[in-house]
């Protein structure tokens, strides 16, 4: 360990970190090439070959040429996922409301109608109302 000073250890860690970051960026770019709808098949093949044959230059050129669109696609995908999640929540809430027999207001209106028609006494109405509101 005497022939490997602390500064060299930091340099090694920095280069290792940069290498990992570059690999992460390379994989993101390959995924972005395939999910891009504005590129045709030959365009995707060309970018992929460029990124694989000349990886450092290919990644840098791709980021300069298509980096903005890459960010826009990420943002649009996030919006689509959020909209799908919100729609799922709405459907799940509607299903649970339907399973419970409607909202509290609907159930209170039904109880009031039953009381008005004489099917429920005042005491039964108060008990059902208390259970519903509890």
Image (cartoon, grey):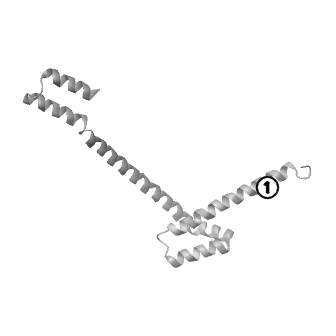
Which residue is most to the top? 123
Q: Is residue 55 left or right of residue 66?
A: right
The one nearer the camera, 125 or 86, is 125
Q: Residue at x 63, y 71 (%)?
A: 51
The one nearer the camera, 1 or 64, is 1
Q: Residue at x 71, y 55 (%)?
A: 17
The one nearer the camera, 32 or 128, is 128
Q: Residue at x 25, y 29 (%)?
A: 132
Q: Considering only vertical position in the picture, is 19 above or below 125?
A: below
Q: How far across and down, in percent of the image, does residue 58 sit?
A: 64, 71
Q: Considering only vertical position in the picture, is 25 above or below 95?
A: below
Quarter location, residue 54 = bottom right
Q: How many C-alpha atoms fall within 10 Å of the one at disc 1: few (<14), some, or many (≥20)?
A: few
Q: Considering only vertical position in the picture, is 29 above or below 87?
A: below
What residue would you read off at disc 1?
Answer: 12
Q: Considering only vertical position in the picture, is 38 above or below 114?
A: below
Which residue is most to the right? 2
Q: How many marks?
A: 1
Which residue is most to the bottom? 42
Q: How far across and down, in percent of the image, does residue 36 sit?
A: 50, 68
Q: How far across and down, in percent of the image, does residue 103 sit?
A: 25, 37
Q: Which residue is drawn at 21% across and 34% down?
A: 107
The secondary element bearing badge 1 is classed as helix
Q: Is residue 34 left or right of residue 7?
A: left
Q: In this view, does 131 lie to the left or right of 54?
A: left
Q: How far across and down, in percent of the image, does residue 118 sit?
A: 8, 27
The one nearer the camera, 85 or 59, is 85
Quadrant (top left/top right/bottom left/bottom right) for the C terminus: top left
């Amino acid at each position: 360990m005497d022939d490997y000073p602390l500064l060299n250890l930091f340099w090694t860690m920095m280069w290792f970190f940069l290498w990992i970051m570059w690999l992460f960026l390379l994989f993101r770019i390959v995924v972005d090439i395939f999910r891009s709808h504005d590129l045709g098949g030959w365009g995707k093949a060309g970018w992929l070959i460029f990124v694989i044959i000349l990886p450092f230059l290919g990644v840098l050129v791709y980021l300069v040429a298509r980096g903005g669109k890459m960010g826009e696609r990420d943002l649009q995908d996030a919006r689509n996922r959020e909209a799908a999640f919100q729609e799922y929540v709405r459907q799940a809430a509607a299903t649970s409301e339907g399973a419970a027999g409607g909202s509290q207001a609907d159930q209170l209106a039904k109880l009031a109608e039953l009381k008005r028609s004489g099917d429920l006494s005042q005491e039964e109405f108060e008990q059902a109302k208390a259970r519903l509101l509890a």
